[in-house]
Amino acid sequence: MPVKQLETQVRHLPDLAIIDLKGEIDSFAELALDSAYSEAESKQPNTILLNFTKVDYINSTGIALIVSLLARARKSHRRLAICGLSEHYVEIFRITRLADFMNIYPDEANALVNVQGSSAGTK
Amino acid sequence: MLAEFAEFTGEEWDQEDDVTFVTLERPANSNKGDQPIPVEPQQIIRGDRKILAEFQLPSEPGRERQAVEHVAIAVTELQLPSARLEKLKTAVAEATMNAIEHGNHFRPELPVSIKVFTSKNVLTVSITDKGGDQIIPEKDAPNLEAKLSGQESPRGWGLFLIKNMVDEMKIRTGKSHHTVELKFFLIGGQDASQTTRNSGEASA
């Protein structure tokens, strides 16, 4: 059965790194997600933004991977933010209470306004 | 089969000839293509049930995506609201993953059997593995703080997600199989989940 590997791309902005995700967040995504996160935090940003606009599937293993990233971010006093989730997955993030620990924005533009605005002068 | 044989010989008679029963089971992964094995013709009526789909998948990682695709196609005629459909898809994916991992232990030769049917305004997806009398512990909601602090594994969301996606969930266990029934009320459905347990041979 063909496996859709998660594709990632990391963009570095001042005090912010954006990880663009494309594909599925499941057990097959672990290496790609970890690797992208390591690249994102390499420049010590205040915030790492996960862009889910092109993600069409997240399962419970994917939720666990996101929990791991959140734990990693909190350990290094970094904020993890989310954008581009579909309504269904926003609800799942609420149900799992991940939404209590991460800001969720509807899209990247909205996230940039809020994240960059709130982190200005904090580093 | 033994019961039928006893009926044939009758209570007062002994079967004197040696009889050898041979049973054949088609392994799920004998399917060389990439499609689930249909078990019965689709779109048939059995009593008050309308079977929308019935198929098997080998117990391999990632196969839950195929289950979701086939169930989604099967329920097209029900015209579920998109939010409802998304919940159905998540519940099916998680229950299938559990069957593949915890029921069949990733053994491809053991099939996961999936049946989709409607009855009395309830849509049911039954997912059966070969796990037998396994007991799935009733867990409280996962403790996110404990997971974030490393006190608990970050995993363990599957059953919790399922319960939050369905109107009702039933678990039936038998000697050789384990069935999870996901129920969605087609009229008056609500998001609150309810779990009931029923031990004994699966009737689905």
Image (cartoon, helix red, strand yellow):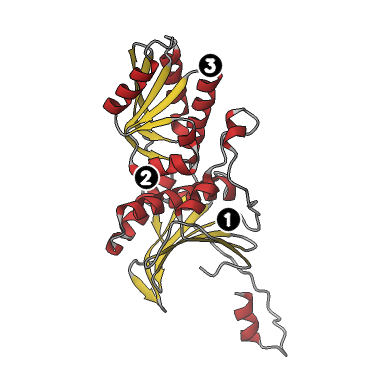
Can the viewer see residue B110? yes
Nearest to the eye among marks 1 and 3: give it: 3
Q: Do the residues at pointers 1 and 2 share their chain?
A: no
As drawn, B192 above or below A33: below
Q: Which picture quadrant has residue A33?
A: top left
- The residue identified by callout 2 is A88
Can the viewer see residue A18? no
Residue nearest the viewer, comparing B171 with B13:
B171
Write the residue at 34% across / 66% down: B42
Q: Which picture quadrant has residue B7?
A: bottom right
Count residues near mark 3 (Cα–Cα under 10 Å), then give few for <14, some for 14-19, many for 20+.
Answer: few
- The residue identified by callout 3 is A76
Compared across the picture, whether A105 is left or right of B24 comes to left
Residue B64 spot, x, y in % from top left: 43, 47
Count residues near mark 2 (Cα–Cα under 10 Å), then give few for <14, some for 14-19, many for 20+.
Answer: some
- The residue identified by callout 1 is B130
Residue A63 spot, x, y in % from top left: 48, 36
Write the residue at 48% across / 44% down: A95
As drawn, A67 above or below B37: above
- The total of numbered circles placed on residues is 3
Write the residue at 63% across / 34% down: B152
CB within 8 Å, label 3 to label 2:
no
Q: CA distance from mark 3 to mark 2?
A: 30 Å
Nearest to the eye among marks 1 and 2: give it: 2
Residue B59 spot, x, y in % from top left: 50, 47
Residue nearest the viewer, comparing B87 with B96:
B87
Q: CA distance from mark 1 to mark 2?
A: 31 Å
Residue nearest the viewer, comparing B187 with B77:
B187
Q: Quadrant of the N terminus of chain B?
A: bottom right
Residue nearest the viewer, comparing B59 with A53:
A53
Find numbered disc 1 in the image and state the secondary structure of the residue it sits on. Answer: loop
